[in-house]
Amino acid sequence: MAAILGIDTGGTYTDGVLIDPKTRAVCAKAKAFTTRENLASGIAACMERLPEKLLRESVMVCLSTTLATNAVVEGRSGRVGAFLMGRSFDRPLPAARVTRLRGELDIKGRQLTALDEDEIRRKALEMRGEVDAAAISGFASVRDPSHENRVKEIVRQTLGVPVVCAHELSQQLGFYDRTVTAVLNAGLIPGITELISAVETVLDSYGLAAAPVMIVKGDGSLMRREYALDRPIETVLSGPAASIVGGRYLTNEDDALVLDMGGTTTDIAHIKGGRASISAAGAAVGGWRTQLRAADIYTYGVGGDSRLAFDPQGGLTVGPRRVVPLCVAGVHAPWLAGELRQSMGRAMTELGEEQYAECYRLTGRVGENLTAREQTLLGLLADGVHSLFWLADRTGCDAAKLGLEPLVRRGLIQRCGLTPTDLLHAAGRFSRWNAETASAGAAVMAARAGKAEDVFLQQAIDTVERSVGMACLCTALGLTGCDANADTIAAYLWNSAVKNAPDDLLRLRLSVDRPVIALGAPVAAWLPAVCGALGARLLIPEHAEVANAVGAAVGNVSVEVTALIRPDQYHEKLVVHAPWGAKAFDTLDEAERFAACKAAQYAAAEAEAAGSTAVELTQTVRPVYAERPGTTEKSFVEMQLRVVAVGAPAWNENKV
């Protein structure tokens, strides 16, 4: 029996599914912890838990990955040399080296200044050994890409590193954002190359070296690995996008909110007409605005592994910081519950308001330039997880001044603490990990709050439900155009609808008029109460806990190509501006026929390069005219012609 292997590497778990390519039914599924420093290890661990015989019959492998998002957010991209033409910026770029070249086009794509090829070679040589990849970006490259293409050839020959042009990634105006997109993409090429190589090694061990490998893009569509090696930036937000595809597939709902609650975040999107809306502003990641096509996703820092802490006023907060749940840490550290309970009194007097009796464990990374105290701390954690006060006692240092945060920031140790997952274990609603350690953590927090453990536990559960409910309300407000003060409005709505105290003058009943498709391992515990308060119909489909991997496995290839027709400077000819170049015509009919034919060919070729052999083309034409003052006549301004090519990914038909 043949199968399609879908893999999703989330912030906490790596999920895997095997799907029948004919019926598209889920045949097997598995989970393993994501290994953030080496994603391939978590993928291998997940694959080990799938039926080996069926796994070896895989005709295609589909992967959604957090690599690009994490690398940008954490500043771990490769060193990039940026070559700019036409303009410079007074704003920073995410590049190691930036240089400006001669060669300039105006906004219509006409050459103002020619390239100086000797200058290009000289400036490229100055970067040799200092960059891992290069990005080429010209002011008007979306009107005519010829300058960018020639610079790319010279830089690639001179430096011998991967080179990407801005016009290859976006046809939108906005020189700065387009340049940022190109620079980020170039910096991700070494990392995606390493990941795909590692994944191929894992696949080879199962005899799957010949299986096509597809990667999920930020809009939920697929691209083959060879295509992804040049465009890794398009994998940003690939995990949340895969969940949208999976949620729609598992429920067959065409108009709904899709909520994916993972370990680190809760992601919410709206599907309408069976498709997720695409962000008009482009994806933003790590503080950088890009011009990438990506699903319009609302992300909130509340998940199963979100840290529960006290704010300065003594109120309980959830997230956005992620920690290892105490119940997970306690599986291999049975002594941890005792260490936590011993710290109950001390946590109230020796720590600041936000802190409490946390625990720490090694990540396995090797540190350099460690102080004597840091070496001692790492040595104490060599046998497993220990509490903050246990470490303080062993080092003879005050707990508040132990200096563990620098080790956390450097990725040498991980913080473990009370999370929503622990609350479920302590309340007896979930039993996968160590409930005793979770209860001990809850007891410490209850003591800090001056409350009985059962009272604190219920209040903490209410706090998590409120955070998830607020996320849903903020998303609904945003989708209906009410972005201003959404947090304040959502808080009022939630409090009024849930509290309903006897003396309330105004009582509200909420009704979210779309079903909520809830995905992720924790949703069965949290979403019934949340959707009850919101007045929303809740759908938790079978396989909801691995929906992202399902979405990866059932996705399609989709490529969009846009051509723009505009008058030339003297309004004598019509110029087609497109990714393949610029060309002038005498009439609009000639220009439109050429653009339509060429765009269809180009889109089909790009879809084939992305991994589909049979595509369906959809064409839309949007002409723009302006009224002439004082007359009823209209002047032609421009025509935008868009072709979308969609097709199923090609797999090894011989195995099916």
Image: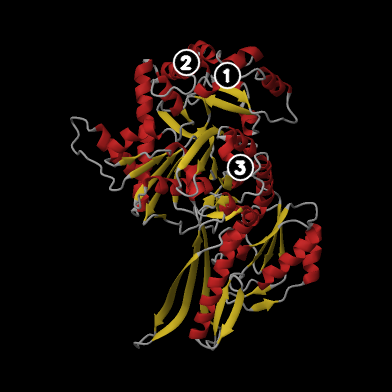
Looking at the rendered structure, the secondary structure element under dot 1 is loop
Looking at the image, is mark 2 or mark 1 earlier in the sequence? 1
- Separation of marks 2 and 3 at Cα, in angstroms: 34 Å
Q: Residue 160: x and y, percent?
A: 78, 57
Q: Residue 79: x and y, percent?
A: 71, 50
Name the amino acid, label 3: Glu
The residue at which mark 2 appears reads as 436
Q: Is residue 366 above or below residue 198?
A: above
Looking at the image, is mark 1 or mark 3 earlier in the sequence? 3
Q: How many numbered discs, if any?
A: 3
Q: Residue at x 44, y 53 (%)?
A: 296
- Separation of marks 1 and 3 at Cα, in angstroms: 29 Å
Whether the residues at callouts 1 and 3 have beta carbons within 8 Å, the answer is no
The residue at which mark 1 appears reads as 332
Q: Residue 355: x and y, percent?
A: 51, 24
Name the amino acid, label 2: Glu
Q: Nearer the viewer, residue 286 or 432?
A: 432
Looking at the image, is mark 2 or mark 3 earlier in the sequence? 3
Name the amino acid, label 1: His
Looking at the rendered structure, the secondary structure element under dot 3 is loop
Q: Report the disc number at residue 8.
A: none
Q: Is residue 288 above or below residue 412?
A: below
Q: Crowdedness of circle 1 by 10 Å Cα count: few (<14), some, many (20+)?
A: few
Q: Report the disc number at residue 74.
A: 3
Instruction: Tell me if 527 is positioned left or right of 94 in this view.
Output: left
Q: Crowdedness of circle 2 by 10 Å Cα count: few (<14), some, many (20+)?
A: many
Q: Crowdedness of circle 3 by 10 Å Cα count: few (<14), some, many (20+)?
A: few
